[in-house]
Amino acid sequence: MTGAAIAGLGITEVGKVYGRSAADFAADAVRRAAADAGLELGDIDGLLVSGGLNRRDRVDLSLQGDLALTDLRLLVEMNAFGASTGAMVSYAAAAVTSGAATAVACVFADAPLKPGRSAGTAYASQGRRAVAGFPGLRTAAGAVGANIHYALAARRHMTTYGTTTEQLGAIAVAQRAWAALNPLAQQREPITLADHQASPWIAEPLHLLDCCLVSNGGVAVIVTTADRAASLAQPPVHLWGWAQGHPGAAMEHGSALGLRTGAATAGPAALRMAGVALADVDLLELYDCYTFTVLITLEDYGFCPKGEAGPFVADGRLGPGGTLPCNTGGGQLSAFYMWGMTPLSEAIVQIRRQAGERQVDRTDVVMVSGNGGVLEHHATLILSPHTRNGR
Amino acid sequence: MDVELRASEALGGPPVDRDDASAAFFDAAADGRLAVRRCVTGDGLFAPEVARCPRCGAATVWITVSGRGRLVTWAVVHRSPHPALAEVVPYVTAVVELAEGPWLRTRLAVDDASSLAPGLPVAVAFARPPDGESVPYFVLEHAR
């Protein structure tokens, strides 16, 4: 056994792409990923699927039929929200290294955007009445939707450690500078800190430019053994380490809401499995549903002491030319929002050295994060262009 | 009482209906009492929606708490997340730590959000909308 590698990447059209279901995007993404790897669709014997929040238009196990895949040895729908991608890839790696399957497609697809409706309403309720009981009480509390929950978390970090909206803005500015170099990015117009500050409040302390895009589309990857990946069409992306972290913090006295996430346990565990240290990490692709998510993940991974990520990011080190390149495709904030597939796909493109103008020099060790719920679920992947033995 | 009436008029938001799981909570709210859950076997206190003690698996009973607490964190919501909240933006939503330990998500009726800080003492009030159940919200202690 030589470990597992990502051998194929398929990205559909993403963004304001209308008239296609999530399942349609998912099938398209898997076909593209197989073709990218140089595999026939029939070579796929494992399929892990994850979808968005819309129960009426959600990719599920019927994807097998949509792809006419027969005799699969692995077929599971998975959900750890934004940590789903990291989870799918790690279980796929376990499957191919154990021999349970030989080529596993992992796919995320979603189609929350509808024509004539703003991105801001893509996940919003439609009825005027709250649902009954305790969920209704939460609506009455005005605490509905991710924007508000992340605003509450970010505020707690700010009031505890002195983090500022300008420091969050530095993350948005750096990522937009990367997006300007990415032909697939939905938002490529450079922004300044002043633009960030002038963008409307969504839920203070979060401005519009602290919040990710909403996108329709699908992304798939093919995971196989490192041996097999070496003979396929693309440079292999080797999986050195993976881990999840789910703090399970109760809503009571002592809760670490907004102060600490599952990244604090998943990051070190994934690095340990990979046999590398934080200082070895060349490139970061971090889940960035909000600027704040990037900030707290940097702290929890240990790139700076707890509470100091604000000043740490404010000097522009995450952007092009910086000392710690992060979200080099523009991320979910500026490129596209395909949940955990956004950071993973950019890591793959960089490791293969196919990133064009935005290609970074060093990609020997790449750290990828996924974050789900309100900072409740975390998955980390450590990727490299080298086999673990061959580095 | 005047403060409570003014604030409740301004509170707005969607009417909330009871269901079986929440009936006792809304009975207490109608009576001006804030109810949370306590484990039948111990002294663990939990948020109203926690039906079974997560620590030991035992059932919970309703108890009335003081309704006093401290502000943990808050957000000033400008982009309405729900049609029935559209006419009340911007509003303050908050997490409050009850004196007894559990955290609650709540509206916070406050004139000037710029004066807010973690740890500020808060106290429960009840909105009594014409439609639906009475709903707890919080006010700054000094505003009462």
Image (cartoon, coloured by chain):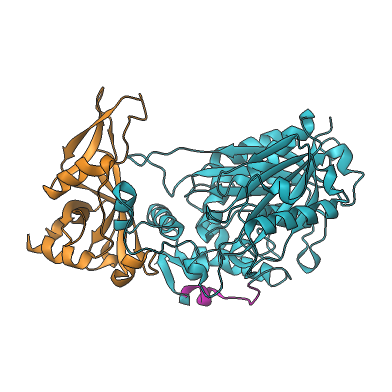
Q: Vertically, is B74 above or below A98?
A: below
Residue at x 47%, y 73% (from the top left corner): A197
Which residue occupies the extreme right position in the image? A231
Q: Is residue A206 left or right of residue B31?
A: right
Spot the orange chain and give its letter.
B
Quarter of the picture containing the C terminus of chain B is bottom left
Residue at x 77%, y 47% (from the top left corner): A68
Q: Vertically, is B118 above or below A261?
A: below
Residue A92 horizontal/vertical position (percent): 72, 38
Residue at x 56%, y 43% (from the top left corner): A80
Q: Vertically, is A295 above or below B66?
A: below
* Tally of marks: 0
Residue A96 horizontal/vertical position (percent): 78, 34
Residue A255 horizontal/vertical position (percent): 38, 41
Q: Which residues are magenta?
A: A187-197
Residue nearer the viewer, A94 or A56: A56
Residue nearer the viewer, A191 or B24: B24
Residue B15 horizontal/vertical position (percent): 25, 59
Q: Is residue B95 visible?
A: no
Q: Quadrant of residue A192?
A: bottom right
Q: Is residue A225 visible?
A: yes
Residue nearer the viewer, A94 or A389: A94
Q: Is residue B94 left or right of residue A389?
A: left
Q: Quadrant of residue A26?
A: bottom right
Question: Color of chain A here?
Answer: cyan
Quarter of the picture containing the N terminus of chain B is bottom left
- Asked whether A189 falls inside the magenta stretch, the response is yes
Q: Vertically, is A329 above or below A70?
A: below
- Asked whether B6 falls inside the magenta stretch, the response is no
